[in-house]
Image: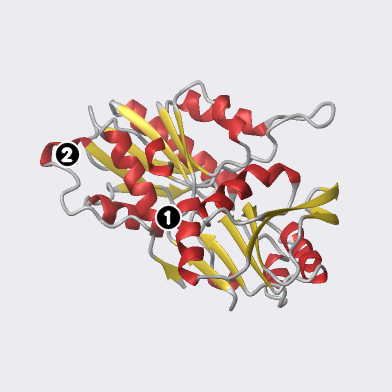
Amino acid sequence: MISSATLPAKPTLLTLEDKSRLKLFSGSSNSALSREVARYLGIDLGPMVRKQFADGELYVQIQESIRGCDVYLIQPTCRPVNDHLMELLIMIDACRRASARQITAVIPYYGYARADRKTAGRESITAKLVANLITKAGANRVLAMDLHSSQIQGYFDIPCDHIYGAPVLVDYLASKRLSDLVVVSPDVGGVARARAIAKRLNDAPLAIIDKRRQAHNVAEVMNLIGDVEGKTAVLVDDMIDTGGTISEGARLLRAQGARQVYACATHAVFSPPAVERLSSGVFEEVIVTNTIPVPADRQFEQLTTLTIANLLGETIWRIHEESSVSSMFR
């Protein structure tokens, strides 16, 4: 089920002059989201040819003049990450060589974000490397949603607008009128994110799960800080990958007496065995957004997908009009 975002469509969003200067193009990773954004803005997606040669190389050609235009390229760098990232870089380069006035890379999901610092010797900080690649390719601005860590904004040597899926998630949770609500962070690093959502949900109480990670994509839940007994617990994270962290957290909450457990995340990465873990019965509902398309074989009964198209479209319009983006989240 896909539900609508919170912002209504604007009836007279852009003047004719603005429409001719604003160009919106979609990569191949989430064309459905791009079409929704275009519908919100009241414009058509720009024509573009994308081909893959027999050896795997990508070819991109913009099929209309964009000279002097403000170009927005929508491309979440989700699975297959390397192909979609390379496609984005080629799109940026093609627009730069076509004399676009400004190129904004709209990246609803920023791949490689988890490698944002060195935790051991001789490691790469790939979040910074990807930022360098996007900048060097010719992007003038980046628009990203719910980065894994806020510090990634500083990795770009160009303006970076960082927006949040929280308004869409909060509006949906508020519409359910859940009683005895407690917002739970699945780890210490996500406390700020969970606190922000708890504040929007009438200052709901906060709980924190202390976990120790043994290896990549493997999490071990150790302890719960806070009270969830007899309450409706909402686990909040930026993404769900294999589902290990959030499902182990849900089991702990059930063991501690939580009456119901919901999971909320902006990015539905859903790497195996995420679907099996999330549909095992520990969650009443798993609520995600459509920053990453969820294919049919990864759908399950408890899954609810909310669209962030209106939020993304409003942000693009505000950037284009040079008005405040941060005021949307106050």
Image quarter for residue 218?
A: bottom right
Considering only vertical position in the picture, is 174 above or below 87? below
Residue 128, position as x, y percentages in the image:
62, 28
Residue 259, position as x, y percentages in the image:
70, 74
Between residue 261 and residue 109, name the one nearer to us. Answer: 261
Residue 30, position as x, y percentages in the image:
45, 55
Residue 328 shown left or right of residue 112 in the figure: left
Q: Distance between the residues labelled 1 and 2?
A: 25 Å
Image quarter for residue 68?
A: top left
Count of all numbered marks drawn on residues in the image? 2
Kind of residue sitting beneath label 2: Ser
Q: Name the residue under label 1.
A: 308
Q: Can residue 258 be seen in this view?
A: yes
Kind of residue sitting beneath label 1: Ile
The residue that appears at 56% across and 65% down in the rendered structure is 287
Q: Can residue 78 be seen in this view?
A: no
